[in-house]
Image (cartoon, rainbow, N blue to C red):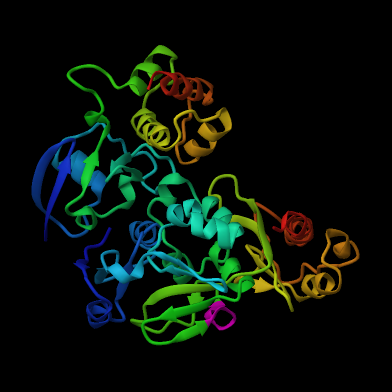
Amino acid sequence: MQKVSIEINGKKVSREIEDRTLLSTLLRDILSLTGTHIGCDTSQCGACVVHVDGKSVKSCTLFAADIHGSKVTTIEGLARNGKMHPMQEAFKKLHGLQCGFCTPGMVMSAVDLLKNKKNPSEQEIRDWLEGNICRCTGYQNIVAAVKEAASKM
Amino acid sequence: MKGFNFHSVKNVKEAKKLASGKSAFLAGGMTTIPAMKLRLALYSDIIDIKNIKDLSGIKVSSKSLRIGATTKHAEVASSKEVKRAISSLAHLADGIGDPQVRNRGTIGGSIANNDPAADYPSACLALNAIIHTSDRKIGADKFFKGMFETALKKGELIQTVEFQVPDKSCYVKFPNPASRYAIVGVYVAKYKKEVNVAVTGVESVVFRCKKIESALKSNFSSSALDSVKISSSGFNSDIHASSDYRAHLIKVLAKKAVAGCK
C-alpha cells in the first residue's frame, strides 16, 4: 500500500491506495470524479486526459503513486463559480460533441494546447489532438470549437 | 493488472540496490504500464527513477549533445539547445506518439525498450551515440541487440545518451497513422568523414543501410540513390506494409532525408 497525497482541482486529498492503482482509478473509483472517462484503457483514445502539474497526460497510463505531491486538474476543475470554462462554452456553442464520451479528454487536451499556443492554426489543432479519438463528430466541430475558444481566451 | 511493490528512489545507488530479475525501472511508463496492463509483462517491483535529479536534462558542447535518460520527449522537442545543435533530433522527438505521450515518455525508456519501430534507436545509430549507463559506456552499434533486446544487464541503468553533433542531418518517417510508430523511418547524418544512414521499423531491430551510406559518401545528393537497389529479404511484412513496400520506402525516405538535411 502507498500513501498518496495529491492536490486535485485545488483540494488536497490523501489516500492509502494499492501500489498498482492507476490515476484514472483513483479519480473515478476512489474519489468519484467520474468526469474523466476511460475509453480504450490502453493510452490511445485520450478520453482520460487530465493535467498533472499543468501538463496534459493520459491518466489511464499513470500510477497514482507516481505523482505523489503533484497538482491534478480534471474536467471537474475547469468551471469557475458555476461558469463554464471558455473551452467548454465553445464546445457547447459549436456542437463539438455528439455522444460526449471523448469530450472531457478532448477539452483537457485542447486547454493544454492553448496554454502553449495562443492562436493555433487548424493544422496545429489537428496535430495536437492526435491522441484524442472521437468516433462521432468527424472532428470538424471540435476543431472549430478550439478555434472559437482561442479567440475568447 | 497484477500487484507489485512501487518504490520511488532518489539516487542511482538506491535504484540498483532494489533491482532484481523481477523488477523494472519506471521513467515515463509509456510502454511499461500498457505492457503490464495487458499482462505482457509482470514485475514484482517497480522502481521509479524519475526523481533521480542527475538523470534529467540537456547539455550541449561543440561536439556532443548529452541528454539525460529521464528527459521527456516534449522537452527534447522544444529544447532550444537541441534545435540548435541537432535540429533533426528535436523533430524526431516531436513526432513520437501524441502530445500526452511526449509529456511522459523518456529517451532512456525508449532506447531501453528498443521497439523495432521506435524512433530514437535510429537517432542513436546515425548520430554515433554513446549510451552511458550506471556501469559503463556502450556504443550504439553494440547496444541494440535484437527485438526488444539491448546490451543492458540486469539492474544496469541508462543515465545519459551522448550524441555526436553532425555537420547536417535529417530524420524522415512514414508513420503508422494510428500509433505514430515508424512503418519505416530513415535517419541520415553527415559527418566530415562519414555518412550514417539508420533505418527503423523494417527489421527486428534498427540497422544501418551500408548500400545507401556508400552511395552518399561519394556523392551526397538524392540523385546518388537513383541506382541503389534495396533487397526486401528479411524485412518485416504485415498488414500495414509488405516487405517490398518497406524496401521501396527506405529509398524514398532516404532521398527525402538527404534533400532535407540541414
Up/down of A126 relative to B40, above or below: above
Up/down of B34 relative to A147, above or below: below
When asked about the image quadrant of residue A117, the answer is top left
Which residue is rendered at x = 33% and y = 57% of the image? B37
Q: As drawn, is B217 to the left or to the right of A78?
A: right
Which residue is rendered at x = 36% and y = 77% of the image? B157
Image quadrant where one finds the N terminus of chain B: bottom left
User: Where residue B139 sits: x, y (%)?
Assistant: 54, 82
Q: Residue furthest right?
A: B227
Depth check: B53 or A8 in front? Answer: B53
User: Where residue A97 sits: x, y (%)?
Assistant: 42, 21
Depth check: B226 or A23 in front? Answer: B226
Count the marks: how many? 0
Q: Residue furthest top?
A: A93
Q: Is residue B161 magenta?
A: no
Image quadrant where one finds the C terminus of chain B: bottom right
Which residue is rendered at x = 46% and y = 31% of the image? A134
Q: As drawn, is B90 to the left or to the right of A77?
A: right
Q: Does the magenta stretch include residue B140?
A: yes
Depth check: A132 or B67 in front? Answer: B67
Q: Which residue range is magenta in the image?
A: B139-145
Q: As drawn, is A99 to the left or to the right of A139?
A: left
Q: Decide if residue A110 is in sight here.
A: yes
Q: Decide if residue B42 is in sight here.
A: no
